Image (spheres, helix red, strand yellow):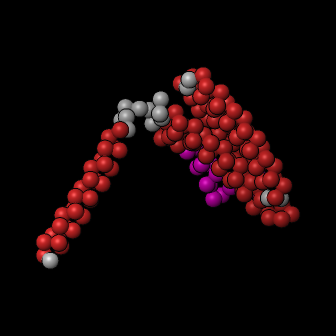
Amino acid sequence: MNFSILQKKIACLAAITVVCFLTTLTYAIDNPEAPDYIGEFKSREKVFIDKINNPKNTNQEYLAAYNGYLIFLEKELNTAFSSLIPKLAKDQQEELKNSQKKWLKFRDAEFEFIINNWARDNFGSSAWISRGDYRTTIVRERVIQLLYYLLNY
């Protein structure tokens, strides 16, 4: 009976060792010399986030901060897309272009919903903040997704 318990402990220890080893291998695959696209993006966006998070903002200042951030994000989106396209094979380029067209339709539909739903009549003066936050979140997530794709090349 003691032998059976010892076998179970050894098997458990072996399984843990294998998992730890495989986890270490996964991290070793990352290229430490690859550009930190995500970190660089977050560094560039910080000035906009700081403006948005200013507790002294008036509604107009929130609106201006979110609009400035959205303009920044649209430029980042175009840059990420333009950086990724030439790294892909022709077939994948067409697939990404098709995906981006569909995403733009999704974005536009979401923006329309956000504008129509978060109206001042329904949500008061915080409607501007909600609109800005939801719209920028949608675009920001796509930028980050494209940057993650770019990390593969």
Is residue 9 depicted above or below 75 in this figure? below
Image x and y of residue 37, in percent: 49, 36
Residue 76 is one of the magenta-drawn residues? no
Residue 72 can be seen, yes or no: no
Q: Which residues are magenta?
A: 46-60
Q: Is residue 124 shown left or right of residue 75?
A: right
Quarter of the picture containing the N terminus is bottom left
Q: Is residue 3 shown left or right of residue 152?
A: left
Image x and y of residue 120, in percent: 83, 60
Residue 53 can be seen, yes or no: yes
In the image, 81 versus 126, the foreground residue is: 81
- Identify the residue shown where x is 78% and y is 54%: 114
> Which quadrant of the structure image shows residue 147?
top right
- Identify the residue shown where x is 26% and y is 58%: 15
Image x and y of residue 30, in percent: 38, 38
Q: Is residue 81 shown left or right of residue 105?
A: left
In the image, 55 versus 31, the foreground residue is: 31
Is residue 39 depicted above or below 60 in this figure? above
Is residue 6 depicted above or below 53 in this figure? below
- Identify the residue shown where x is 56% and y is 29%: 84
Q: Is residue 90 shown left or right of residue 60?
A: left
Residue 53 is one of the magenta-drawn residues? yes
Is residue 29 depicted above or below 23 in this figure? above
> Which quadrant of the structure image shows residue 73?
top right
- Identify the residue shown where x is 73% and y is 44%: 107
Q: Residue furthest left?
A: 3
